[in-house]
Amino acid sequence: MPLASRLRARHARLLIVGCGDVGLRVRRHLGAHWRVLALNREPARAAALRAQGITPLAGDLDAPATLARLAALAQRVLHLAPPQGQGERDTRTRALTRALRGHPLRAVYVSTTGVYGDAGGAWVAETRATAPATDRARRRVDAEQGWRRWGRMQGVVASVLRVPGIYALDRPGGDPRERLRRGAPVLAPADDVYTNHIHADDLARACIAALWRGAPQRIYHVADTSQRTMGAHFEAVAAALGLPPPPRLTLAQARAQLTSTQLSFWLESRRLTTTRLTRELRVVLRYPDVLTALAAG
């Protein structure tokens, strides 16, 4: 029986916190029989959520008093919202877990592989110690720890998905073709870093798998099987599409031209193992490589 069908048979109510592109894809993969609710702080977006079969719930992670009604609404919670923009601690996760108390059976928090910092191109498993190099990554580590600690205290299965760059040809801001068309540079081969990616639809399917199969307080990498440097990745995309390859910059040139936020993504190199994704969550990727997605259109 398909996973979504088994989910429907037993627990058909899901709360999504941070229902953007990936959340909408989760909703589509679940099908019509699920009742999906989404925390929504933008009243103007409520009609668009309803059009997708999602019940909007007014609330704001930055205003904890608005979250009180979330306590007993859903058996499963998918947390896709990022932390707030400043500081080393994630106040939003604290507010959400306090509001939920112990009611959900399972929760999944979608984090980032940026929590590892720079691994020098080494293979990275989920057991590797975190070494965040930016406040943005430190907030993610704090959020992960908060969810796992809360899960242990409340007896809730709280799984963490660590996710690299998300792409899809129809994803706003996540279409690799757009980067090439605007001539965005990559690092010169001598300075290049290993980069990791996941198609937005495969991430959505991994979220559903974790909501059903995730182990208590377990961490999972969600990444495709490609293992290229950033420059090689975009050169492969360019070759597949018949577009010019991206311009190359030395690291010294990049330091002079890029913002500190942009540069932070160029200073971390790692390759992710995904054994837990395939063996424990039993996810079979539809797009194991960006070239597969390009071929599918």
Image (tube, rainbow, N blue to C red):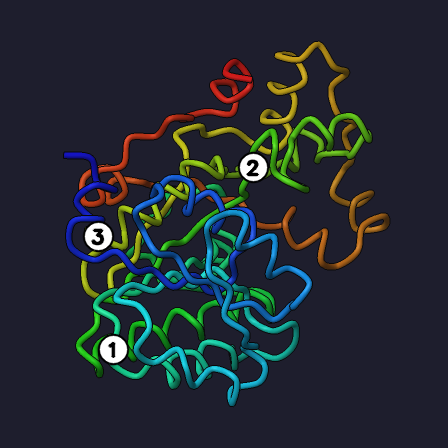
Q: Are marks 3 and 1 in contact (CB under 8 Å)?
A: no
Which residue does the image show at 25% across and 40% down from the upper left?
275
Inter-mark Cα distance, 3 to 1: 16 Å
Picture quarter with the C terminus: top right
The local secondary structure at tag 2 comes to strand
Residue 237 placement (x, y as % from top left): 62, 20
Picture quarter with the N terminus: top left
Q: Nearer the viewer, mark 2 or mark 3?
A: 3
The local secondary structure at tag 3 comes to helix
Q: Which residue is mark 3?
A: 212
90 sits to left or right of 278: right
Of residue 107 and residue 185, the one placed in the foreground of this image is 107
The local secondary structure at tag 1 comes to loop
User: Which residue, as the protein is rendered here, is positioned at the far bottom?
Assistant: 65
Is 202 situated above or below 150? Answer: above
| Type of amino acid under label 2 | Tyr
Q: Which residue is mark 2?
A: 167
Of residue 253 and residue 149, the one placed in the foreground of this image is 149
Of residue 78 and residue 240, the one placed in the foreground of this image is 78
Q: Which residue is mark 1?
A: 103
| Type of amino acid under label 1 | His
278 sits to left or right of 18: left
User: Which residue, as the protein is rendered here, is positioned at the far right?
Assistant: 257
Residue 127 placement (x, y as % from top left): 28, 57
Of callouts 1 and 2, the N-terminal one: 1
| Type of amino acid under label 3 | Trp
Q: Nearer the viewer, mark 3 or mark 1?
A: 1
88 sits to left or right of 213: right
Which residue does the image show at 56% across and 33% down from the upper left?
168
The crowd level at tag 3 (other Cα within 10 Å; few <14, some 14-19, many 20+) is many
Residue 294 placement (x, y as % from top left): 55, 18
